[in-house]
Image: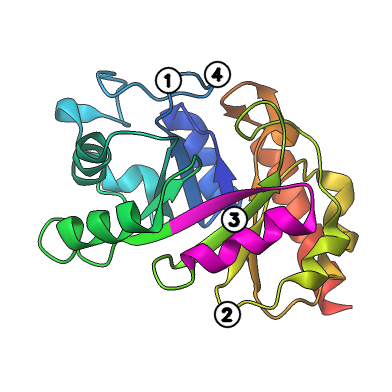
Amino acid sequence: MIIKVCGMTQPANIREVVAAGAQWIGLIFWPKSPRYVPMQSIMAGIVPNRGTLAKELFGNAKRVGVFVNEMPQSIITHAVQYHLDFIQLHGQETPTLIRNLRDTLAPALCPGIKFIKALSIKSSEDLAQWEEYRHCTDYLLFDTKCSCVGGSGNKFNWHLLEQYHGDIPFLLSGGIGEEDAAAIASLHHPMLHGIDLNSRFETAPGIKDAKRIQSFIQTLKQHEQD
């Protein structure tokens, strides 16, 4: 089970969360988000030398850049300067855009770059949108449909996952908290490859409680073994 922690903003906190067991770290490059990491930021450790990430900060954790209806050139610039492993698209991005980004970035600029397409879920119809992305994305992320763009702290009806019969692996997102470990462990969908943690583990927007994340991961592993 991949553990992705999204909305990270501070170097020291990233180190803590990686040490707690997070395997993917999400950096949000959408200016309207309270967890926004500005491109021009010179925060020591995250963007030294105007964009190059310090490798020791992330260790073996993958770097996920999150974008919402961003211009392609901006996504490409972020991917190169932040040495992203994944690009997560959380808006109304089309399959054609994803294919064009992949053709531009791989293999010359970002070898091995992968794509995650987020879908906002409330109904069966929302879930069915996955078919549009069948041949262009590496992962799907199922999040709760809301008036904002993610980070609502609310869950959608996880029973809808039973209607997903696709062949693209997905991450489950939306309002996951410490109390959900047993319920997640009981989800035996063959394409469920990971979970996305965010607002329910925060002490403030962009600041995560690493001890609670570590406790949650340990509890989840225990339930998976039972």
Q: Nearer the viewer, residue 31 or 200?
A: 31
Q: CA distance from mark 2 to mark 1?
A: 33 Å
Give the residue pinned by disc 3.
Answer: 141
Image coordinates for residue 17, horizontal then vertical, percent: 56, 43
Q: Quadrant of the N terminus?
A: bottom right
Is 104 rendered above or below residue 154? below
Q: What span is in magenta?
A: 116-133
Give whichever of discs 4 and 3 has the lower sequence position: 4
Whether residue 110 is visible here, answered yes or no, is no
**Residue at the image point whose x is 82% and y is 62% from the top:** 160
Point out which mark residue 31 bears: 1
Describe residue 56's horizontal placement relative to residue 199 as left or right. Answer: left
**Residue at the image point whose x is 55% and y is 50% from the top:** 118
Task: Look at the image and say whether residue 131 sits in the magenta stretch.
Answer: yes
Give the residue pinned by disc 2.
Answer: 167
Point out which mark residue 34 bears: 4
Three-letter code for the amino acid on which mark 4 is drawn: Pro
Image coordinates for residue 99, horizontal then vertical, percent: 29, 61
Q: Nearer the viewer, mark 2 or mark 1?
A: 2
Callout 3 touching callout 2 (CB < 8 Å): no
Give whichever of discs 1 and 3 has the lower sequence position: 1
Q: CA distance from mark 2 to mark 4?
A: 33 Å
Q: Nearer the viewer, residue 55 or 119?
A: 119
